[in-house]
Image (cartoon, rainbow, N blue to C red):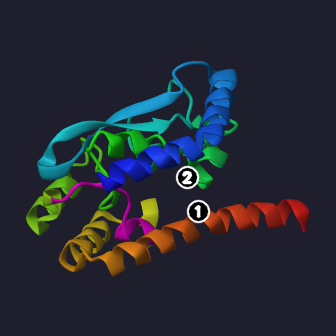
C-alpha cells in the first residue's frame, strides 16, 4: 500500500510534466501518447508496461539495442524524454496496479528469452520488477544479459531498506546528472 500511495503522490506532483510531455508528443506525432508493451513480471506473469512514447509510430516493437539506427526513430523531443527518464513516469501506473515496485529488476521484454531464463535460474523472477534497480544504476541498457542478471541476483540476495535507499539515491543521481549537464551546456 505504501508503494501505491507514493506512486499516486508522485503522479500528482509531476502532473504538469506529464501534461507537457503528452502535449509535445501529441503535437509532433499525434496519438497514441503512451507506448504499451508486454513485459515479464513476478513469476514470469506478463503485464502491459506503460511509458511515454519517445519514438515514432512506425518503430519496430523490439529493444532499442536491436534497432539498426535507434536515433532515426526518435521523436524530436524523444531523446530529451529518454535522457531525463520522463518516459518512465507512466510506470507509476504499473505500481498503482500492483504489477511493479519502485525497486527491483527492470521488467524484461516478453521476447528477451535468454534474460528471462537466466533470471529464472537465478530465482530473480520471484520478485516484482521495479521502476529502478541495482542493474539500472550500474549501467542501465548498456549491460549484457549476464551482467544484468548478476546484479539482479545480488539485489535479490541482499534486499534491505538500506540497499533500497542506496538504489534510490543512485537513481536520483543517474537522472540528476544529465539534467545538470544539460543546464551546464546551456547556461555556462
Residue at the spot 41% in from the left edge and 72% down from the top edge? 167
Q: Residue beneath label 2, please?
A: 85
Confirm whether residue 38 shows in the render. Answer: yes
Q: Position of residue 176 (x, y in %)?
A: 63, 66
Confirm whether residue 59 shows in the render. Answer: no
Residue at the spot 27% in from the left edge and 54% down from the top edge? 129
Note whether 149 is above or below 1 in the view shown: below
Q: Is residue 72 magenta?
A: no
> Which element is circle 1 on?
helix
Residue found at the very far right of the displayed protein: 188
Residue at the spot 36% in from the left edge and 71% down from the top edge? 134
Q: Residue beneath label 1, please?
A: 175
> Which element is circle 2 on?
loop
Quadrant in which residue 17 is drawn: top right
Q: Are marks 2 and 1 in contact (CB under 8 Å)?
A: yes
Q: Which mark is residue 101?
A: none
Quadrant in which residue 177 is drawn: bottom right
Q: Is residue 135 magenta?
A: yes
- Report the number of numbered marks: 2
Report, in whole angstroms, how far the alpha carbon at label 2 lies from the one at label 1.
Answer: 7 Å
The residues colored magenta run: 127-137
- Count neighbours of disc 1 (C-alpha within 10 A) and say few if under 14, some if 14 to 19, many if 20 or more: some
Q: Which is nearer the N-term, disc 2 or disc 1?
A: 2
Residue at the spot 30% in from the left edge and 61% down from the top edge? 105
Note whether 81 is above or below 144 in the view shown: above
Which is nearer the eye, 162 or 179?
Answer: 162
Q: Position of residue 120 (x, y in %)?
A: 11, 59
Amino acid at each position: 500500500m505504501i508503494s501505491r500511495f507514493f506512486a499516486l503522490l508522485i503522479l500528482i506532483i509531476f502532473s504538469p510534466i506529464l501534461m507537457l510531455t503528452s502535449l509535445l508528443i501529441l503535437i509532433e506525432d499525434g496519438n497514441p501518447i503512451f507506448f504499451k508493451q508486454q513485459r515479464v513480471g513476478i513469476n514470469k506473469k506478463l503485464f502491459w508496461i506503460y511509458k511515454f512514447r519517445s519514438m515514432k509510430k512506425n518503430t519496430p516493437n523490439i529493444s532499442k539495442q536491436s534497432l539498426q539506427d535507434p536515433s532515426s526513430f526518435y521523436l524530436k523531443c524523444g531523446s530529451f524524454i529518454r535522457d531525463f527518464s520522463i518516459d518512465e513516469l507512466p510506470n507509476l501506473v504499473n505500481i498503482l496496479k500492483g504489477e511493479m515496485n519502485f525497486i527491483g529488476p527492470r521488467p524484461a521484454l516478453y521476447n528477451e528469452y535468454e534474460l528471462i531464463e537466466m533470471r529464472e535460474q537465478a530465482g530473480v523472477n520471484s520478485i516484482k520488477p521495479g521502476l529502478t534497480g541495482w542493474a539500472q544504476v550500474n549501467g542501465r541498457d548498456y549491460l549484457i544479459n549476464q551482467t544484468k542478471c548478476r546484479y539482479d541476483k545480488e539485489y535479490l540476495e541482499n534486499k534491505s531498506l538500506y540497499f533500497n535507499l542506496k538504489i534510490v539515491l543512485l537513481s536520483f543521481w543517474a537522472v540528476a546528472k544529465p539534467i545538470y549537464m544539460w543546464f551546464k551546456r546551456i547556461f555556462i
